[in-house]
Amino acid sequence: MSKAIRTTLSLVGSLVLFSALTMAQPGGNNANKDKNKEHHSRFAKVAFWRRVQEKSDCAVVCAEQRVVQEG
């Protein structure tokens, strides 16, 4: 094989690998985004679920009151 053909094949191979690397790069950045998410404290989670429970309890009480008023 002549030196020119080997050089050309080497350049083509390098370009193919480089383009594959650049196409794969954006997918790798998504892993860093997950690490930057803010984690909520246990206290904040308890407060959130307590409010959700209060709202659902209120909905049950309000529904019971409507049934009593209609009856």
Image: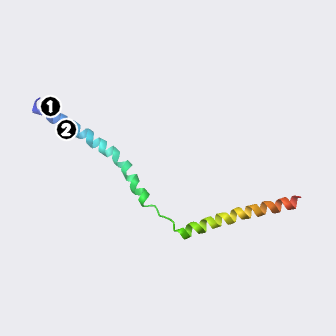
Q: Is residue 19 left or right of residue 69?
A: left
**As displayed, is residue 66 above or below residue 7?**
below
Question: Residue 29 location in percent, x, y?
Answer: 37, 53
Report the disc number at residue 65.
Answer: none
Residue at the limit of the structure toward the left, as seen here? 2
Question: Residue 3 location in percent, x, y?
Answer: 10, 33
Q: How crowded is mark 2: few (under 14 residues within 10 Å), some or many (20 or more)?
A: few
Question: Residue 47 location in percent, x, y?
Answer: 60, 69
Label 2, secondary structure: give it.
helix
Label 1, secondary structure: give it.
helix
Residue at 40% in and 52% down? 30
- Marks 2 & 1, CB-CB < 8 Å contact: no
Q: Name the residue under label 2.
A: 11
In three-dimensional space, the C-alpha distance between marks 2 and 1, rounded to whole angstroms, equals 10 Å
Res 53 → quadrant: bottom right
Res 32 → quadrant: bottom left
Q: In this view, does 70 lie to the left or right of 29?
A: right
**Could you tell me the amino acid type at mark 2?**
Leu
Residue at 34% in and 44% down? 23
Report the disc number at residue 5.
Answer: 1
**Front in this rendered view, residue 29 or 4:** 29
**Front in this rendered view, residue 32 or 41:** 41
